Image (spheres, rainbow, N blue to C red):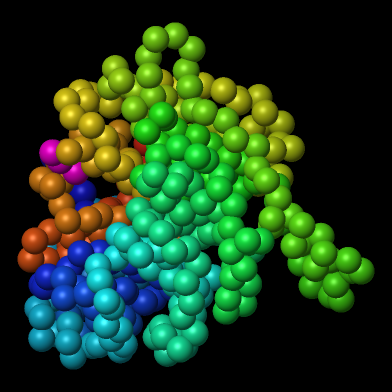
Amino acid sequence: MSQDYISVAIEGDYIDSFIYSGTLFLVHGDSRITTYDWASLLQSTLHKSSEGSVTTQIYEFLKDCRCGMVADAGVSTINIEQQQLEDQLIFDLQLNGWPTDINIYSNCFYIASEDGVDELAFDYQSKSLKPDERFRVWHEYAYRVSANDGHRLAIAAGANGVITATPRKGYIKENEDVIKLLEIDSHDCEWIGQNLIANSSSGAYVSTFPALPERPNGPLPPGYWREFEAARRSRPDTRKVELDGDISVAYAWIAGSKLFSFLSNGELSVERMPISDEDANSQEISDVEGKFLNLKTGFKMESSILAARSGSFGAVIETSSNLITVTERGCQILANRPVSWRVFPRARNYLNHLHVVEDDQLIIHAFLAFEGANGDQSDRFGISTDDVR
């Protein structure tokens, strides 16, 4: 298989990472969170390479995948050493323990851990967190945290099931703002558009929430905030992800308007589903509701699936043994038992990025563009920029 990506390898001991609006977040093995300006970090590294159009193209591509690179530019890996990274440090926050997950959405940063979930404000201009504005949203074990518009949170809380929370500005009232959505042992959840998907001990569930009212450009109509608050606290419609017959769903995830179900026979079933009210009312979507495609992955499930997500380049599946990409070109093992990994299905700039934390480095794979089966620049196992909400 030809080189399908350009990699940025960052030396160091990490347990997690995130990239958001030009800011790179790193969670270190010594329980610190640090931030860096992604563009400055790239510039400081690439300026040591040969100058010219190729270097400029790589720089723009790593900042925004929509700039596109359809061919390997002769560069496979860009290495960032520890001292180079330290020279670009912007912010450093010491933690009391190790997070199980981090997330950022609408300039709110979330830290999940065995003690619960904390929220901190993020200053976009300074690319720094605000520890003085930190407060606890959830006070028990949290495996995963996912945020959505309207300051809504979902928490996969293990034996406590799946929790939804609607914090206020700088605080939360637990008896009013925290709801148990699923009372099933759950280890994973993700919010995409109006849909929240959770994987639990008894299978995968999709919850579809009402849309929040759009804010007009002009004066707010009477009762707008009352309607907004009622919508953001509304209960969703929840259903289990199931197929007819004896084939079971081992794991399910959402990428844009696609609901992927990895099946016990090694196939990947895809269901078209609305991700907004506009989609729900679209004739094009309603004509293809239900299972419309069964994709042969060529991957035999020999061990349990721990997590799965999609980027523009295809799907990523983590088993108890390997981290595997599933694309139109086939399957490829990228890592063996990584510390952590992450894709960014809601970030147009980084839709082609795959972060893989290994024992002594973070590797950021930026997948090259190609002409997909449907004539666009996304893989059919993945998500298109047109589907990002």
**Up/down of 15 relative to 330, above or below:** below
Q: Which residue is at a point 27% across and 76% down the rendered structure image?
A: 96
Of 70 and 150, the residue lying toward us = 150
Q: Residue furthest top?
A: 245
Query: Main structural element of the magenta stretch: helix, strand or loop?
Result: strand
Residue 385: x, y in percent? 48, 52
Is 125 within the magenta? no
Bounds of the magenta segment: 321-325
Name the quadrant containing residue 25.
bottom left
Residue 131: x, y in percent? 41, 85
Of 7 and 125, the residue lying toward us = 125
Residue 237: x, y in percent? 65, 37
- 255 displayed left or right of 193: left
Of 113 and 68, the residue lying toward us = 113
- 36 displayed left or right of 154: left
Can residue 14 be seen here? The reply is: yes
Residue 47: x, y in percent? 18, 84
- 351 displayed left or right of 242: left
